[in-house]
Amino acid sequence: MPVEQRVVGSGVKIGAGKIGGAKIGKPAPEPAPEPAKAKGGKGLVVALVVVVLLVAAAATWWFVLRPQDGAAAPVEEKAPEKGEVVAVEPVSLNLAGGHYLRLGFSLQLTADAHEAPDPAVAIDHAIALFSGRTVAEVSDPDTREELRDELAQRLSEVYEGEVMGVYLTNYVTQ
C-alpha cells in the first residue's frame, strides 16, 4: 500500500501568487509592533521610596519619640523649705544725677543650705543691678519689686539654689 503524504498549510498553494519572483495578491502582513515598555518604572520607585520613608519615620517615633509609661506624668518639683535668714550689711550705691541709694537686704536661705554664703557676692550683684538708675526709677514701688525679684533670681543662680529670696531691709534715696 502506498503511503500518501499531505502538507497542511494556510490555504495558499505553493507557487500561487508569484510571477517571476514578484508577489501578487495579498501583501504579506506587517510584523506586529513591539509592545511599549510599561510606564510606571519611575512611579514604582517613587512609591517604594515613600513607603521606606514612612516605615523609617514610624520606627523613629516608636523607638525614640513616643512617650514612655513613666514619662507621661510630669514630675512636680517641691518648693524648697525655708531655712535661716542672713543679713547683709547696708551699702551706699551711686545713682544717676549724683544721687545715692542706701541699700540693705537679707538673704532667705533654703533649709538644705550647708553654710551661710559669702555676702560679698550678693553685694556685688546688687551694685551691678541698682547702680546708675534714676531716683524716680528706684523710688517707684513696682520697679523696686522687679529689681528685688531680679536680684533674688541672680543670687539663686550664683549660690546654686541655696538662696530662695531677698528681703529689702534698708532702702533710702538721696
Image: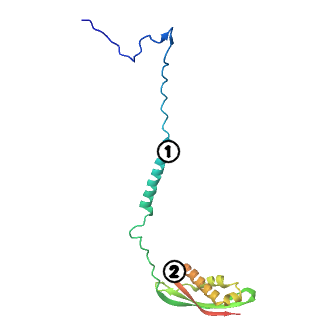
Q: In terms of image quadrants, where is residue 103?
A: bottom right
In the rendered image, residue 145, in percent from the top left (x then y), is placed at: 61, 87
- Front tag of 2 and 1: 1
Q: Secondary structure at mark 2?
A: loop
Q: Secondary structure at mark 1?
A: helix
Q: Can residue 92 be seen by looking at this rendering?
A: no
In the rendered image, the vertical position of residue 75 relative to residue 54, given as above or below: below
- Left or right: where 105 falls relative to 94: left
Which numbered circle lies on residue 43?
Answer: 1
Instruction: Work out which quarter of the rendered image holds the N terminus and state it.
Output: top left
Image point 73% across, 86% down: which residue? 96
- The residue at which mark 2 appears reads as 161
Q: In terms of image quadrants, where is residue 2?
A: top left
Instruction: Work out which quarter of the rendered image holds the C terminus and state it.
Output: bottom right
Q: Can residue 122 be seen by looking at this rendering?
A: yes
Q: Amino acid at mark 2?
A: Gly
Image point 58% across, 86% down: which residue? 119
Work out whether residue 141 or residue 45 is closer to the camera in this orientation and state it: 45
- Left or right: where 153 falls relative to 8: right
In the rendered image, residue 92, in percent from the top left (x then y), is placed at: 67, 90
In the rendered image, the vertical position of residue 70 relative to residue 128, given as above or below: above
Work out whether residue 93 or residue 152 is closer to the camera in this orientation and state it: 152
